Amino acid sequence: MDKIRAFSEFEIFYGLYRPLTPYGRARKEERRFYTGAAALKEEYDLTAAMSVFLAGQRQKADKLRFHLRNIPAVELSPEALNSAAGLFLARKFLANASEIFKILPAPLRSKLGAKWSSAGLLALLNKGGAGEAFHIADAYCPDLAAERAAIAACDRTLKLLREKKHKALRERWGLDFTDRDFLVIDDSAAARLGGAAELFAEPFDGTRVTVKPVYGPEYMEAAAERDRRRGREQELEAAAVRKLAAAVAAEKRDLSAYAAAVERTDIAAERARLAAELKLTRPIIRKYPSPIRMTKARFLPLEGRLAASGLKYTPLSAVFTRRVNIIYGSNMGGKTVALKTLAFMQLVAQSGFFAPAASFETCLFDDIAFIGGAEMETAGGLSSFGLEMNEFAEAHERLKTRNMLLLMDEFARTTNSEEAAALLGAILEDLGAKSGAFAFLATHFSGLRSGKGSAGFKMRGFDTEAFSEYFSGRSACGLDEKLKMINRFMRYELLEGAAGVEARDAIKIAGILGVSKAIISKARQFMEEKA
């Protein structure tokens, strides 16, 4: 799928798809390609239901996005839950999931599988704090509250003893230990202390000494009592954590179901956002093989680039009732864009999104393959022609076991035209006989043999009359203006029933792009002589 994604520039669109939760982002990275109608219908139904709910509900939409954005990834293993940090994530997950489910109306909750039954567990975890805070609260254990009260009493005793000692040292020796554990004084000042028993002194460097208060037995006893109490507090906290972890683990199945519902909600909400912002419509999926119908289909990557350059974009409308289709046209006439549009629309639809078109009707394929393109280079000793043949052979082999949408752009363009036409005719006839193939070939070769079951199309091409009227009497212009003129007068429309019509726009476009008038005149003369 990598090559067809690159050819259709699908990742540009996919980059606009931004799920808010860790679960939704993980789902995005899977890049699911739906080949089953039932699974795809479920995705479309969720997007449609979410779109209806969010339409005109700005406040609820913002609230939903807020809680989705605040959902953490919760780890439900015993190791992860056996800590305050793990319990905090579980509480944060439950708190936001609960709010998300409250926002959704009952019918939509049912579709998303958002069934809530953990109010008791959330209330238990909420005893440890709300918002972004969580701790092992006294409420989790009566003995814990008693130990913490005793620790607080020890802290008060220690503080009073320190303050008493600091006062005595200030009054007797002029040393201020307020907010300090030690002081650094010079040797002469230390000598005046005369080895005072309430001070501990040790060398700091060659000329200075570090002095610390000696708080005495009463202080040491209070500190030891605090350490003992603190050890007991940690034991009680660990026991409380184990109980809370067990309570969360007991509802592990429910939490896993909530995570799945959150993922579906996130994906549906994000697809609904894209549908609204990009004006997407629900695709119509028919049983294979069925005609592919596009009405005003928009190839979004190109639409965006043209808009940024001030150029007009023409949506594509077409109906393909045959399984083998040949698109004829000159260079720059839109053949490749037609293929890209088709590939883009199919990838969007089979990835679970609504499509950028007034309407898009298609069937499902097990695979999509692309062969050709000017970007092909030599690899592994093969020429461009060799690479094309190798890729076609691989795709042809896959057709034995699956339905495939096969797109070929200027296939066999690097060999001589006589052999290329013969090879293309044989390939098209072969694909027409394979029920699993739905093929599109864009080519500048005219009149290819393709079998009775194929259909020919031609890009309408350059509007010479309109261009001549516009360009008459105008001075030469730069490349940007020339490209804009080509865009303005090129008619990117597919006309059916043009299998034998040869493309005739190349010389006109060469002239617009600056090839000398003498060369253009001679080329036209050669064309007339050939005719």
Image: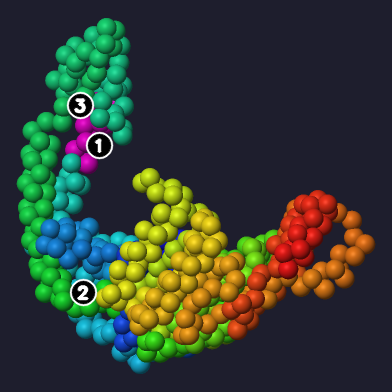
CB within 8 Å, label 2 to label 3? no
User: Helix, strand or loop at disc 3?
Assistant: strand
Q: Amino acid at mark 3?
A: Pro
Q: Position of residue 83 (x, y in %)?
A: 16, 57
Residue receiving disc 3: 213
Q: Position of residue 458 (x, y in %)?
A: 62, 76
Q: Nearer the viewer, residue 264 or 411?
A: 411
Q: Amino acid at mark 1?
A: Glu
Compute the Cα span from label 1 to label 3. Answer: 11 Å
Mark 1, mark 2: which one is toward the viewer?
2
Q: Quadrant of the C terminus?
A: bottom right
Instruction: Confirm whether the magenta stretch covers residue 166.
Output: yes
Q: How many marks?
A: 3
Compute the Cα span from label 2 to label 3. Answer: 57 Å
Instruction: Confirm whether the magenta stretch covers residue 521.
Output: no
Residue receiving disc 1: 163
Compute the Cα span from label 1 to label 2. Answer: 55 Å
The residue located at (23%, 9%) in the rendering is: 191
User: Helix, strand or loop at disc 2?
Assistant: helix
Crowd tier of the residue under label 3, counting other residues whose Cα lies within 10 Å: few below 14, some 14–19, many 20 or above: many
Point out the tag, 1 or 3, that comes first from the N-terminus: 1
Q: Nearer the viewer, residue 496 or 281?
A: 496
Q: How is the image coloured?
A: rainbow
Q: Position of residue 370 (x, y in %)?
A: 43, 66
User: Helix, strand or loop at disc 1?
Assistant: helix
Q: Main secondary structure of the magenta part?
A: helix
Q: Quadrant of the N terminus?
A: bottom left
CB within 8 Å, label 1 to label 3? no
Which region of the structure is painted magenta? 159-170
Crowd tier of the residue under label 2, counting other residues whose Cα lies within 10 Å: few below 14, some 14–19, many 20 or above: some
